[in-house]
Image (cartoon, helix red, strand yellow):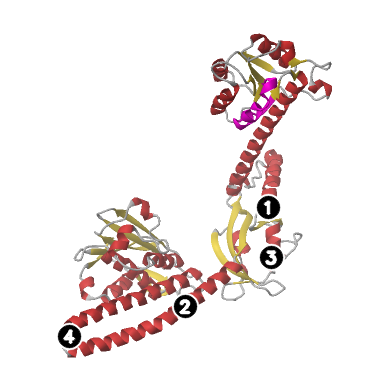
Amino acid sequence: MKGAPAMEADIAQPAQTSRARASNVPAIGGRVLIVDDEIDTAKALSRLVAGEGYDTMTAYDGRSALAVVEHWLPDVVITDLTMPEMDGIELCRRLHETDADLPVIVVTGVDQAEAGLSCLQAGAEDYLSKPASLAAVSWCVMRALERRANKRERDQLRARTDELWEQLRAVNERLVVSSVHELERAEAEAQQRAELNALLQGLSEGIVVVHASGQLRLLNEAACGILSVVQNLAGVDALNALDMRDVRGRPLRDDERPLQRALRGDEFADFEVLYVPTNGLQRRLVTTGTSVKDAHGRVAQAIVVFRDVTSLRRLEQQREEYTALISHDLGNPLNIILMTVDLLKVSLASRQLASDVQHVSRIERNAERMVTMLDELTEATRMESKRRAPLRTPCDLGELVANVVSQLDESRARRITLEARDAGPYPLLGDAAQLERCITNLLTNALKYSGAEAPVLARLSRNASDVQLEVVDRGIGIAPDHVEQIFDRYYRTAAGSQQAEGLGLGLYIARLIVEAHGGRIDVVSTLGQGSTFRLSLPLRAAPP
């Protein structure tokens, strides 16, 4: 050590040999690595620290200390600041490359007090100026160990919190009531329920848990706030007495209520209801229900989670009204433009001004494109609001596809080939107009992104539960990183934006229509070779 005094001067020994004993605070215990190029000082400090109940190891330079850490990981490191080759600050940095949380206490000389700030900036836990008393050293070590232990405890608590959250996701498996093992697991299950209840009480979503017998097991604070009820409700009968209606305002039958559906064993998500509390202020609630079954497959407990979407629905309604207003205000002048253009084309043609007719036709095409864009925007906004359910009537998917093809102009219709994998028919319950809009979007999308004469295949099939339509093109294809987003609102690939015009709402509207009918839609594509869009709809599905 630079200018190091004798060992006795480096470590002042008070009458009491340690702060821990002076204050009757027991040492925490742990491993302490002491690094000092003065061998006598290092050994003396090692003996004194060991006397406080710590396991110690000594090293006489920075490189030796790093070698020790490779096979003997300490809980605290006490190092001198001034050492040859590698000083205490550099050693602190190197140690933190191995263990970022390792506490390092740097001992500085009398004339090195300003170096203490550099030590802390380098990540040191603390620093001591010589001569340092044993009480000061013991206190620094104890505080470093306490902080390290507290951090580990926080990390364990965070891990436990994550574990509890995962337990919540698997609540069906954990809450199964088995009479055979009930006595063995009673204490463990009681503890788990207490932990889950504490977690559930803190959620912003309302949660109701009801036993199959009708006993109310849980009604968290969020549920009480949303439903404007108190937590000591008598049970399921009191919840069933609440005024619940469908989104049209019709009172729900008992078997339609979310809690009763969950008690029957139904699994459902995003089931929206209208709740009318006693104060008359209606609320829109989105509910999700599940159940926990016993070993015999019978419902043991029903769980319903719901959230208040009243403000969200109000904003959606305002957006729909605003969009409709804009569409109406822009649609009127566009219609006038189209009528005027039509008259102008007739006039120019009668005067044999063919070149001028072409210019006017360009105006007409762009005006029609704007009308289409406004229609798509209005339709997407209306579908998103979900305020009007599809009109379910019997129809046939094959007939819907044939109707759409027949309405296309001849140049596009002759490129489409209809194919059936079986004899049909392809019956379903749905809104024929909406489904034709979906099919039109898929077919026109395939035509737009294929070559001028490239064929498009519309293939029909069915199985025991669904009817399917595949639209196969040989167009530009979709890159793998775009496939997951192709059905999103306004989404267009870079290649698609260059090849076709529009808002990027066609496939988005198709997805909304299919999902509103309880179906699914996806795409398989190879870049440069083409795409296959597949939609599946329930076979003769009953209306919800």
Residue at 19%, 65% in the rendered image: 453
Mark 1: amino acid: Gly
Residue tagged 3: 227
The image shows residue 345, relative to residue 514, as above or below, that is below
Q: Magenta segment: does it hold 112?
A: yes
The label nearer to you, 2 versus 1, is 2
- The amino acid type found where label 4 is placed reads Leu
> Which badge, 1 or 4, comes first in the chain's sequence?
1
Q: Is residue 467 magenta?
A: no
Q: Which mark is residue 324?
A: 2
Pick the front one: 493 or 119: 119
Residue that carries the numbered disc 1 in the rendered image = 202
Q: Amino acid at mark 3?
A: Leu
Determine whether the residue tagged by mark 3 lies in a helix, strand or loop: helix
Contact (CB < 8 A) between labels 2 and 1? Answer: no
Label 1 vs label 4: CA separation?
A: 76 Å
Q: Position of residue 237 (x, y in %)?
A: 71, 65
Secondary structure under the numbered disc 4 in the rendered image: loop
